[in-house]
Amino acid sequence: MTTRVAASQAAVEPGQPARGRRSVVHRYPVDLVRVGLGLAIVGIGLLIAQRGQLSVFERDVFQIINDLPPLFFPVVWAVMQLGNVVAVPILAAVAALARRFRMARDLLVSGLLAYVAADLIKSLVRRERPGGFAVDPFFPEGPIEGLGFISGHAAVAAALATAAAPYLTRRTRRVAWGVAAAVAISRIYVGAHLPLDIIGGAAAGWAIGSLVHWAFGLPRWEPSARRVGALLARYGLPVRDLRRSTVVARSSHPFEAVDETGRRVYVKVLDPDRFERDWLYRLYRVVAVRDIKDADAVAPLGQQAEHEAVAAMTARERGVRVPPVLLARGNQKGAVLVQEYRVGTPLDEFLPDDVTPGLLAEVWHQLALMRGARIAHHDLVASSVLVDADGKPWLVDFGNAVTGADDDDLAGDVAELMASLAMRLDPVVVADSAVDALGPDVVAEALTGLMPLTLSAATRHEEREQPGRLSALRRAVRARLDLPDPDRYEFAPAGRVAVAAVTVGAALVLVGVPLLADSASLLETVEHNGWRWLGAAFALAVVARAATAAAGLFTVERRLALGRTYGASMVADGASLLHGHTGWRRAAVRYLERAGVLPDAARRAMDRFSAGAILAAVFVALVTLVLAVVEGEISQWGAPEAAVPAVLLGAGAWVLVLTGQWLAARHAAATQPGSPAPARLVTQAVRRALARTPDAGHGSDPWRRGAQFAWAATAVVLEGATLAAALHGVGGQVPVLATATVYAALHLLWSAVPVTGAPGAADVALLLALTALGAPLAAAVAGVVTFRLLTFWIPAALGALLSGRFEHRFVT
């Protein structure tokens, strides 16, 4: 919530800050994310540095910078001293002399910690400086002795820039980071460090500065009344009796005053450094819920003020009760929005008994007018509704508003207001009033937004203080719309015998397949070839599943979060262990239902997903086959090694797993006769998905189909690359194109005939195919085990653990 207008309370003397304002500090969790990212970069650099080798790329980058003309040295030397530990107390003293005591403290602590941490890491890694490698360094100051990783100068400079950044303007912040980068590059220029050293140093300094911010907190910028008055006079709106308002505000600073005509005005001073500008926060919002909430936060301050004014005036012209806008102007140093002051009470301060059905109906009517004008408020909580003395609601705070909004943004307003009202009123009353005023279709579209992460920070905070309110609202909406009960589990108990059969079958695969090769040979292949390729296989597996989740996003009309869809794919894999392909499909459909997709639409979406996966596998198999034939990489086939024991092992595990799944289905039918019927055959699903039906919605959109196909094909390619990387990491010398072709063909088989992809059959099929292509048995076994662990077994295990969380916390 950016701000809200409230009734005037105790006055504050002109020019004086509200009580306690300047002593308030904030701790932002995103600083801990920066700490984690910085430490991760240092850790990766540490692993590379401990190899004791210099890559061609790092050598070339070093030579390019180190070979620059000597005439730059005097300037470079001067800049380089800003990374010297001696600069730390000097800069801290300068900040203290300027009465920036918090800044001085952060500079001193961050700089000294970075210096100590750099020395500690150097002693642990013991990587040599450039003179110890096969490079031709230029030393303008003479040869430099000592250890290289990490660069102390780069660490100190990055820590100082990070510590100072919150206290600087945007322009000087860029200068600070430019100087930190110059310090780091200067260390390469003088031959003191290699590129990896300065990357590690900069990451360590960034992490340390962020940790200091989180530990001490950051004060919030507070404009003085004198400065605000001067700004208003400059923009042509002189005022008197300017004082801070008692209005609660998070990303702005509210004032109230009287203009020359005696009219009361509300002055909103925009915060130049609101947290919504943070790129990590914005990235998190995109991944988690595909919604930034305030896309205009990175715009110049003056543009933000004008944007809010345009949205408010547009809403007012379309009949929405919005206070008139008197001024919207600003620059990078400050911006203001001025509106007529409306005396009233925010809706969040009403007692439940005072919120009458007529008032609720009028509030929803104002929202309906906003929807008709296609204006999304993006922060429509109860405190953004001001009720005047006549009982008429006014909408305020359009700082995050969007004109020309799409359906998802409009649905988000409905969800936000329903959730905020449900924190104060009976959720059943809220659901009924919304359906009566807006209609069932509009409320159904908002159902996907009734999840904690999609809501504003204010509503999430209230939900944590009143747990269960949001779940009760979702149940009330579903009951009113006659949607499936979200509290029921999708699967009936499977029975002990079924669980035992599947467990034994899975254990037979995980233990038996490695026993096909000598265990010493397996360890030797990994040790000899190193762990870098296995790390690459892990990264590729993670990205491949993300591509699969992205393909799923394009099968429905709803806005789905990539992160949650990623988790849902693991839950579906976990369900497939005990319930087969039917379980996988039910879990996926269940996730879509919880996201607000109606049951029939969810089943059609899974039809489209299955069809897309099959077509993508066909495409990738054909392309890789043609390339492999052209390159001559698939011409030589041999008899697979250990074929008989492998087939017997795979068949035994496969039969056990299928038997367990059959017993689970029988037990479910016996204990819960009304349990869902088995899923339709894959061929029927594909035919239904490929048919363009009038009710297909976005599924019949060629662009969405194309995007789904592209992501599905990308997922198959990445999974094939995961297998190739895992095989290469354990010494399997099989051409990449041949590996990709075989995997794409098997993926096509598993997608078209899901029973062939069950545990046991899938693992042994991969093993036989790789040994037939010439991979040694030990390498093929290690590669298959690694690949299946990364792409199925570990995700399925995590999915089984996540299933309860998805059934309850993420239900809609």
Image: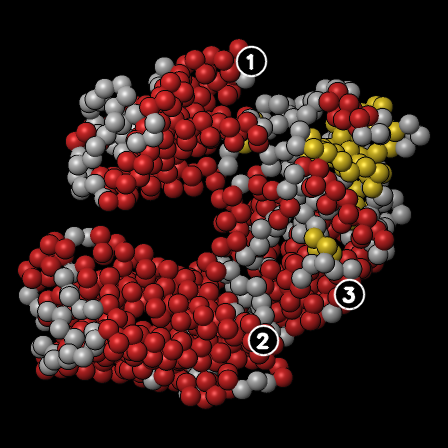
Look at 25% across and 39% down and name the residue there: 59
- The 10 Å Cα crowd at callout 3, few under 14, some 14 to 19, many 20 or more, is some
| Horizontal relation, residue 767 to residue 213: left or right | left
Residue 249 visible:
no
Look at 48% across and 88% down and name the residue there: 687
Distance between the alpha carbons at the discs numbered 3 and 2: 31 Å
Amino acid type at mark 1: Ala
| Horizontal relation, residue 762 to residue 110: left or right | left
Q: Give yes or no for contact between labels 2 and 1 (Cβ–Cβ under 8 Å).
A: no
Coordinates of residue 741 in the picture (x, y in percent): 28, 75
| Horizontal relation, residue 260 to residue 620: left or right | right
Helix, strand or loop for disc 2: loop
The residue singled out by tag 1 in the image is 98
Q: Nearer the viewer, residue 502 or 74?
A: 74
Amino acid type at mark 3: Ala
Q: Nearer the viewer, residue 700 or 373?
A: 700
Residue 724 visible:
yes
Q: How is the image coloured?
A: secondary structure
Look at 83% across and 23% down and name the residue there: 241
Query: In the picture shown, does residue 333 fall above or below 742?
Result: above
Looking at the figure, which quarter contains the N terminus? top right
Coordinates of residue 375 in the picture (x, y in percent): 74, 56
Helix, strand or loop for disc 1: loop
Distance between the alpha carbons at the discs numbered 1 and 3: 58 Å
Query: In the picture shown, does residue 395 fall above or below 39?
Result: below
| Disc assigned to residue 701 | 2
Distance between the alpha carbons at the discs numbered 2 and 1: 61 Å
Q: Nearer the viewer, residue 497 or 13?
A: 13
- The 10 Å Cα crowd at callout 2, few under 14, some 14 to 19, many 20 or more, is some
The residue singled out by tag 3 in the image is 437
Helix, strand or loop for disc 3: helix
| Disc assigned to residue 52 | none
